[in-house]
Amino acid sequence: MDARAFFLLQYDVIRMLTDELLLAGVNDHQLRHAPGEDQHSLAWLLWHTSRWEDVALTMLEREALQVLDQNRLFDRLGVAHRDIGAAMSADECLSFNTTVDLAALRTYCAEVELRTQTVVEALWSEELSELVPETRFRQVMQAGAIGEPDGVWLERFLMNRSKAWWLSSVIWHQTTHLLGEATWLRHQAGAPLNMLTTRM
């Protein structure tokens, strides 16, 4: 099994767990629910993880736009931020939870997932060790990725990373948020119990 196949296997497992365990039985109100002003909602986590994945996979293509900029998705989402949202204040998160179009958010997540699978399947294994060119890195950053005040130090941290690094970041980012934090949020939102929440 090569690195691409291994990535896709891990990716499929995370997506299956997210769809069949984490999001199963969750209604729109529960998706928008944040248990406290300093905590996120499930909808915000879906946005945040999909935005990171969108940015990461865009790094691997020479000229491609982010999925967010295709088919007027950003306009359809009804949100104020283009970045991954890590620097959003409590009030901004509350506004996001209130205004985000959940149908458009589901579409965005699905299209990001499809693009990820398509890009990875087309990669040559030899490409994975290549660094993302600085010009491409800055092009993607300027199109909207990291918000202030985190922009400067995080851009320095992310620069000069390999394509394999960016792919790996998708896995650990989703594992941390969707199979960690989101499990607790599902429970707090009052979603039906399942194997994930009954073991908390």
Image (cartoon, helix red, strand yellow):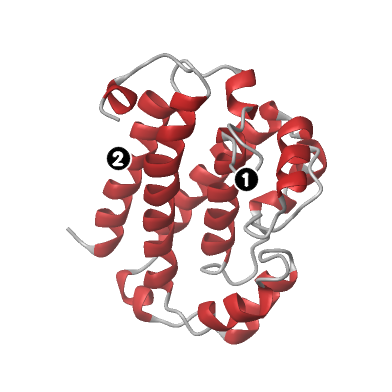
In the rendered view, tell whether residue 54 sits above or below residue 124: above
Please identify the residue farthest to the left as the structure is shown.
Answer: 1
Q: In terms of depth relative to the viewer, which is nearer, 59 or 198?
A: 198
Residue at mark 2 to residue at mark 1: CA–CA distance: 30 Å
25 left or right, relative to 195: right
Image spot of residue 4 (x, y percent): 30, 60
Q: In terms of depth relative to the viewer, which is nearer, 60 or 168?
A: 168
> Do the CB atoms of the residues marked 2 and 1 lie less than 8 Å apart?
no
Image spot of residue 67 (x, y percent): 65, 51
User: Would you identify the image quadrant in which residue 166 lies?
Assistant: bottom left
Residue 121 appears anywhere in the view:
no
Residue neighbourhood size for the residue with mark 2, other residues' Cα within 10 Å, grouped as few (<14), some (14–19), many (≥20): few
Q: What amino acid does circle 2 point to? A: Val
Residue at the image position 48 percent from the left and 51 percent from the top: 116
User: Would you identify the image quadrant in which residue 146 lies?
Assistant: bottom right
Q: What amino acid does circle 1 point to? A: Asp
Q: Which mark is residue 9?
A: none
Residue at numbered disc 1: 38
Image spot of residue 36 (x, y percent): 61, 36
Disc on the earlier residue, 2 or 1:
2
Q: Secondary structure at mark 1?
A: loop
Residue at numbered disc 2: 13
Q: The C terminus appears in which quarter of the rendering? A: top left
In the rendered view, tell whether residue 146 sits above or below residue 26: below
